[in-house]
Amino acid sequence: MKVCFLVPPVIVGEHPAERSSGCTNVVYATPNIYELQVAACVEKSGNEVIYRDCINHKESIETLLRREKETPSDVYMMWTVNLSVDNDIEMVRRLHGVLPQSWIVLLGPGATYFSEKCHVDECTIVVHGEPETTVVELLEKWEKGNDWKNTAGISFLECGEHKRTPMRALMKSLDELPMPARHLVSDIEYRNPKLKLTPYVTMVTSRNCPFRCIYCVPSSLTFAREIEYKEHFNRKPPISFRSVEKVAEEIRILHKDGVRAIGFMDDNFIWNEERTKGICEVLRETGIVWGCQARVDAITENIAKMLGESGCGYVDLGVESFNDEILEYVHKGITSKQIYEAIALLQKYKVPVKLNILIGTSPLETKQTIKETIRKAKRLKVDQLMINIVSPFPGTEFYKMALENGWIENNEYVPTDVQRNSILNYPHLTAREMEQLLFRSNLSYFLSPGFVWKQMRRFRSWKDFTHALRTLKVKLFG
């Protein structure tokens, strides 16, 4: 079958959604590693695969529909996140307006949670949770003309009724997956401002996170898995790992292909010293510059040393607040003391640190606690500071709390870009006040002489500089 993975143009709203993290609009282009992984499985099973990225190729809806009408695919797949749900539903309608018989499959957390909303017609299928095995089986049944409606892990519309099949078991071994189909996006130059080297790719070595932060929306694939698993078992799904050997094999292949920078998209990259050591050794061997996300309580002296010696270009630390009462309330599982210790260790071994602060994670937040957290973060002189506003994402514990306490505007969740907007109102702290605090804090930080000078020294070319400038403009002003 001919399968088209489609990143649709913006039809609804003003900005494109970022689909790999899933909770912000696009600031800079990032390859959706989760979608490319599904594409690789589809390709491996013998299907013809094409990839249409209308955002990066600046293709209009009119141009897209005209081309697809002339050279249609049998199946269209879209990776849907909360911020893109309405846009993607409109894309389904437009596509079926010109190609009424084509199958359209929606994947990702937006489709998993808002599945009934996504059942536009009887040729639109939602794949719930982890998608690879489900998608391959679905395509095989369509190809052979077999009954597809008993495929585990899907939902659909039949005679006006929403139907849903039993949950599909999670994959037992991630080592069975082929390498992501990066060749499908080889015509797009991706850049990560934190690493400043190209060619840049993303990579994943594990799925899910066992920790209990009440507000947490992990990567879009992990969130889709969590939504589906929690609905059936009322707990987080188990973590899935790729073996160090498979990770090392992929890194060496990427290095041979000329890749110079890797961003690891794992919700939590550092699990223990032995695993970290194995991956760091091959990264040091290849000379690839890389970055990852980690918890502060995972940073030991040995870990920090490994990172520093293996070319780690950044570690993303989600600290959210320096207030211990707030950290305890949101079940972060860390203390402010551990935050300071982790940062000190990373700085000791010259590992660049990016701190993530999240405004409004609990009703204990006030203007004063927010300002104090940001002041403390700035004093640490880390390489980057990222400040966002918490959103009550459906499927999280925080969403239930916010609904029960009437903290959500109009008592209804509306997808928002956490980089600038809020729908959360506490009795003593409104959404507008949080938005103002966020904007002013970002403005004072990103335009400060210290930040500008530190970044300027790292640019290797005029192209790097102009890319960073565009990224900053989008970050601050949309």
Image: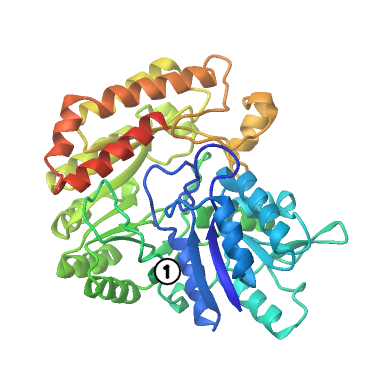
User: Which residue is identified by label 1?
Assistant: 184
Q: Position of residue 410 (x, y in %)?
A: 68, 25
Q: Position of residue 207 (x, y in %)?
A: 46, 61
Q: Quadrant of residue 253?
A: bottom left
Could you say where residue 214 lies in the image, as x and y percent from the top left? 53, 40
Question: In the rendered image of this protein, does residue 459 appear above or below residue 170?
Answer: above
Q: Which quadrant would residue 250 be assigned to in this image?
A: bottom left
Q: Position of residue 281 (x, y in %)?
A: 19, 68
Viewport quadrant of the C terminus: top left
In this picture the colour scheme is rainbow
Q: Residue 476, can we see it?
A: yes
Residue situated in front as seen by the camera: 301 or 136: 136
Q: Is residue 323 left or right of residue 418?
A: left
Residue at x-position 18% and y-position 58%: 306
Residue at 50% from the left image edge and 39% from the top image edge: 15
Q: Is residue 299 above or below residue 439?
A: below
Please give the name of the residue rendered at 43% of the width and 55% of the height, measured from the top-left corner.
57
Q: Nearer the viewer, residue 197 or 347?
A: 197
Quarter of the rendering occupied by the N terminus? bottom right
Q: Residues within 10 Å of mark 1 (few under 14, many from 20)?
A: some
Q: Is residue 169 visible?
A: no
Of residue 396 and residue 100, the one placed in the foreground of this image is: 100
- Residue 270 placement, left or right of 153: left
- In the image, what residue type sits under mark 1? Leu
**Which element type, helix, strand or loop, lies under badge 1?**
helix
